[in-house]
Amino acid sequence: MMTLFEIIFAAAVSLYFIQLIVFSVGAAKKYLKLRDEELPTATVIVAARNEEDKILECITSLNSLEFPEGKLEIILVNDHSTDRTGEIISEFIKDKPKFKLIVPEKAIGSLKGKTNALANAIKIAGGEVILTTDADCIVNPLWAKTLVSYYKKDVAFVGGFTTQEDRTAFEGMQAIDFLFLLTVAGGALNIGKPLAAIGNNMSYRKSVYEEIGGYESIPFSITEDLRLLMAIYDLKKYKCVYPLDHNSMITSKACPDMPTLFWQKKRWGVGGVDSDLVGYLIMTWGYIAKAAMVLTPLFFSLTALYLCTFKLAVDYFFIKPVFNRLRVRMKFTHFIAFEIYYIIYVLILPFIVLPNRKVKWKGRTF
């Protein structure tokens, strides 16, 4: 007869498994694309603050974007950097007319930080579609054209997948974490349930952005990308899609150390506090399953050991096909590092977020 611990563990792992099956089905959904000659105009926006060590790689990759002639502009926002970010941008774009550099001199409404920088750029953007990425990202030449190709007339939002450099196990576990969470987010959105979005690889129609009143009409959040997606989705008039397409994937820099990673996770956790009941239920089954894995040595049994192995296998066979579809390698040693890291941060994050929601980000405190 199974013990109470084994019953709870088995129930949590079963529900977790069912969730990942559903997300896998959603993530695999395919969408029709526009031909090159049908592509609308587009504006790429990058808000940069104190990124002197990363910005050149980013804008060099943006300069290599393939897009129909005269239909793409790139707006770089120097968000009051105190280092050489602005100088590096100015020097690079001086003979490149598709680039614009602005400094947000005024706050739009009560906006602050990155959100205000983005809102200032969107005000002057000439593209029908807005694409955003971050200064620590490198885009592939087909990135913009691929995202924009999904803008059939009824589409208002298109998300893309982001991976990270994976030279070490510390970087590799972050890369797997990014794609794992984005597969959950993309799969959920594709079946009609927005759970998350990532601002370093997303896009939306400018006309729909204006229809919701812009960022200034959305309650402030440290995860402004998710708030924007929710506002667009809540209109109930347009499609929001997250295609699993390797040509729309970008690569970002991994957090270089534990303190930086801590603040990234806390920022995401604070944003996740605003989830609805479905979001909390999804988090709950995963939380219980991971807690049970940690407690298995105290309630040791062959059943508990089998459940731990099954949970690891479920995670592996959920994320490995995504890496294959995106044409990215996944080292098994990095997967093991990810599982250890995943268990630890999921279990401790509520105790970090709930007592204190202060977040440090880009040299500012929110």
Image (tube, rainbow, N blue to C red):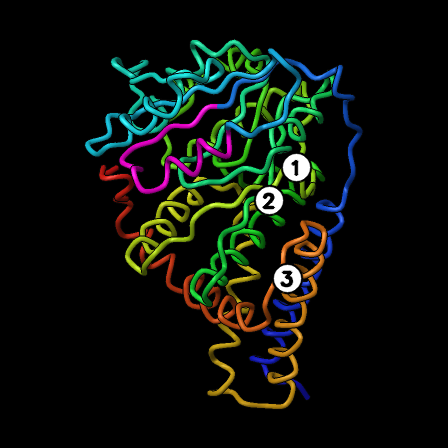
Q: Residue at x 71, y 27 (%)?
A: 150
Q: Point out residue 311 in the picture as x, y percentages from the top left corner.
A: 63, 71
The quarter of the picture where the N terminus appears is bottom right
Tag of residue 242? 1
Q: Point out residue 297 in the picture as x, y percentages from the top left corner.
A: 48, 87
Q: Earlier in the sequence, mark 2 or mark 3?
A: 3
Neighbourhood count class around disc 1 (C-alpha, 10 Å): few under 14, some 14–19, many 20 upward: many
Which contiguous range is marked in magenta? 45-62
Q: Tell whether label 1 touches label 3 (CB within 8 Å).
A: no
Foreground label between 2 and 1: 1
Question: Which amino acid is tagged 1?
Answer: Tyr
Q: Residue at x 47, y 58 (%)?
A: 174
- Secondary structure under tag 3 reads helix
Label 3 sits on residue:
16
Label 2 sits on residue:
185
Neighbourhood count class around disc 2 (C-alpha, 10 Å): few under 14, some 14–19, many 20 upward: many
Q: CA separation, marks 2 and 3?
A: 15 Å
Q: Check the image and name the residue furthest to the left.
A: 82
Asked which quadrant contains residue 34, the reply is top right
Question: Which amino acid is tagged 2?
Answer: Ala
- 275 lies left or right of 136: right
- 279 lies left or right of 107: right
Q: CA separation, marks 2 and 1?
A: 8 Å
Foreground label between 2 and 3: 2
Q: Is residue 129 magenta?
A: no
